[in-house]
Image: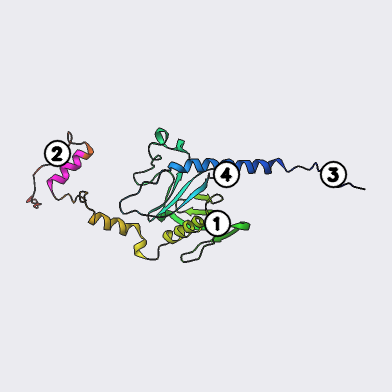
Amino acid sequence: MLDLQTFQSYIDLPDHEDADKESNEEVEKNASAFFDNLHEPRKLQGETKVAEADKVLMFAPFSDRKQGIIGHLFVTNFKISFVPADKSSYPDGGSNQVVMRSKLLEHTDIPLTFVDTIYQVSSGARRKKLFPGNSVSASTKYLEIYCKDFQVHVFGFRFAPQEQNKQITDAISHFSYPSKDNLLFAREFGYSSQFDDGDQPVPQFLQKDDWERELERLQCQGMWRVADANLGYNMSVG
């Protein structure tokens, strides 16, 4: 007869489960420390932030969601911007912003005009294609963004707060498929450029001073000069 008081079980949990638990705790601990002094994305004139989420995972391409980095995901009226939490991703140990791939975009930015298709993966691996005006699930496990330049970006929300989870998914869907002109960044950019206080207006190059400032900006004063010839835009008699 089996004595339950002296019975001992020698069945252990699989090693990988313990390792996964320790790994998750380590990620959450590191993420909390990283987010204390987090950088924000560089915004253009007329660009406004509409949503954000903490502790978002950005998976590396072709990694089968096994490799990636943790950071902060932002949505503006111009782009989706991922800011890595690891300060080694920044030049000079984090004193500057991340490396720029162009004058408008950082390396981990996705312009909203590039977005072609969005899939929301919720619990149970249910995959749902998001359409303009559709309601989104309150629990997003992964967000797959297929772009017109053939890139695929996958974000994981395992550690993100649930209220931010739904807000940022809704914002990405809402601004990627704008149904009104006031959601377009071009409208806000043009409006802010026209009525911006303090900054110089956009040069029209109708005055001599505009051309001289442009040559100075391009450092071409030694090769080019601004002349008064044909100041009145007269037609040639020849």
| Residue type at numbered disc 1 | Thr
Q: Residues within 10 Å of mark 2 (few under 14, many from 20)?
A: few
- Determine which of the numbered discs, if any, sits on residue 140 in the image: 1
Give how far apart the Cα atoms at labels 4 and 2 are: 55 Å
Give how far apart the Cα atoms at labels 2 and 1 are: 59 Å
Viewer-side label of 2, 1: 1
Q: Nearer the viewer, residue 99 or 205?
A: 99
The residue singled out by tag 4 in the image is 63
The residue singled out by tag 2 in the image is 225
Q: Label 2's element?
A: loop
Of mark 2 and mark 1, the one earlier in the sequence is 1
Position of residue 209 relative to residue 134, above or below, is above
Majority SS type along the magenta span: helix
Q: Determine the residue positioned at 57% across, 54% down.
A: 141
Q: Is residue 238 left or right of residue 136?
A: left
| Residue type at numbered disc 2 | Arg
Give how far apart the Cα atoms at labels 2 and 3 are: 96 Å
Q: Determine the residue positioned at 47% across, 60% down.
A: 170
- Which residue ends up furthest to the front in the rendered image? 5
Picture coordinates of residue 187 (x, y %)? Answer: 31, 59
Question: Was residue 102 drawn as part of the magenta stretch in this picture?
Answer: no
Of mark 2 and mark 3, the one earlier in the sequence is 3
Position of residue 136 relative to residue 217, above or below, is below
Viewer-side label of 1, 3: 3
The residue singled out by tag 3 in the image is 7
Q: Label 3's element?
A: loop
Q: Which residues are magenta?
A: 207-216
Give how far apart the Cα atoms at labels 4 and 3 are: 45 Å
Give how far apart the Cα atoms at labels 1 and 3 are: 44 Å
